[in-house]
Image (cartoon, coloured by chain):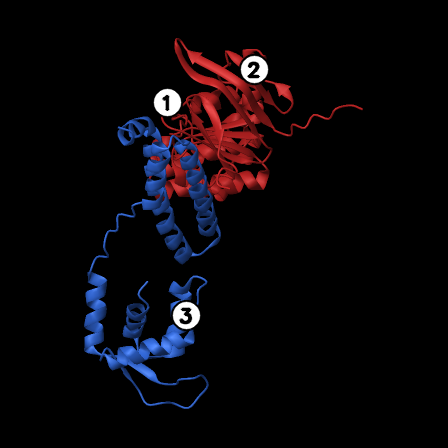
Chain colours: A blue, B red
Amino acid sequence: MSVPLTLLGLLEREPSHGYDLKRDYDTYFGRGKPLPYGQVYATLSRLARDGKAIAGPAEHGEGPDRKRYTITPAGIAEVGHWLAEPIPPEPHLQTVLFAKVVLALMLGRPAEQYLDRQRAAHLQRMRELTDLKEHGDLMDTLLADHGLYHLEADLRWIDHTAARLDVLAQAVNQ
Amino acid sequence: MTAIEPVTAIIEARDVVKSFGQTPALRGATIAVQPGEILAVMGPSGSGKSTLLHCLAGILVPDQGEVWFAGQRLDTLGENRRSDLRRDRFGFVFQSGQLVPELTAEENVALPLLLSGTRRRPALAQARPWFDRLGLDGLENRRSGELSGGQAQRVALARGLVAQPAVLFADEPTGSLDSVSGELVMSLMTRAAHEHGTTVILVTHDARVAAYADREVIVRDGQVTSLTGAAK
């Protein structure tokens, strides 16, 4: 999660104070990890320094900073560029798991049992995410789905690998 | 001092062996399911998971081993007694709804009650609340050809649950549905099962479907491997 770009994106809706941005960030993206105020204001200062936002005059009121920030055309362009750019389709190679499987086969250790433990751990996490979907709102559902589909992909790899352990064992022990 | 039988399982297979001709499907499958538990039975194609379900449900008789339901030996019962048990105590949902095309959705839901001897009017009255519960309001008089796949499967689910079975057997219940319809079926199934304390034995190869269960086992080469505790 890119905090600066996400805050900049929230700022594109309308000029906002830091605490408004923090509140919306925590609501939509925080997921139990609220953004520290210090990080919000430090980020806004950097965005202003880099010409992506403009800080308004200080206002009287509660809170550490009552400046209202406005996004600049450069900031809007930056958000547009970020949204349009596909994120790297990371292969999510299970490198640690892959290494464990290969090593287990090399050492004649029970790779299938290790894969079963990983499968159980994945399914447990999938149960937790499914429970979140069952009791959460649409935002929770979308977020949980993202996790579920990734875990499912890992599980398919685990199943596929488990079905080919004999051949893999021959390959690594040649 | 009398030994107390520690088994609390509502349904259980003990060392079940089942072959089809020369082909072994189950090679000593053992499993115990607790009352009210939702159990996912996973495993690769041809591993024997559907055969296990059919043996537990009394549809197939094992070649060796025992099947117990509610303290009663199931595999030694005659076909008629097993048929009665399936009708009165078990519910079924299969991959595609398998609704009776000549009957309306409401009559399909009421079918297990009608077959058990409940008169038509009370059977339909008992079927009706399920349409609201499963989001099927207004579809009571449609025939299966007039229902979407997801709707038909929810009607099949209502039919599986209408007689308040002790155990619901579900064999790939979302296999023919898109992911959103499938999730709706699973969500409704698990909620209704928890509400009524129904035990569910769910055969699936889909991990996202299995994630609705309380626990999962894997059938591999005709034997059952429990994953419970494996992650610890």
* Residue shown at 46% from the left, 62% from the top: A32
Q: Is residue B73 left or right of residue A97?
A: right
Q: Which mark is residue A101?
A: none
Secondary structure, mark 3, is loop
- At label 3, the amino acid type is Leu
* Residue shown at 40% from the left, 42% from the top: B183
x, y percent for residue A33: 44, 64
* Residue shown at 40% from the left, 84% from the top: A65
Q: Chain of mark 2?
A: B
The residue that disc 2 covers is B75
Secondary structure, mark 2, is loop
Secondary structure, mark 1, is loop
The residue that disc 3 covers is A35
- At label 1, the amino acid type is Gly
The residue that disc 1 covers is B46
Q: Is residue A27 visible?
A: yes
Q: Are marks 1 and 2 in contact (CB under 8 Å)?
A: no
Q: Is residue B129 above or below residue A138?
A: above
Tell me whether marks 1 and 2 sit on the same chain: yes
Q: How many marks?
A: 3
A42, B118: nearer the viewer: A42
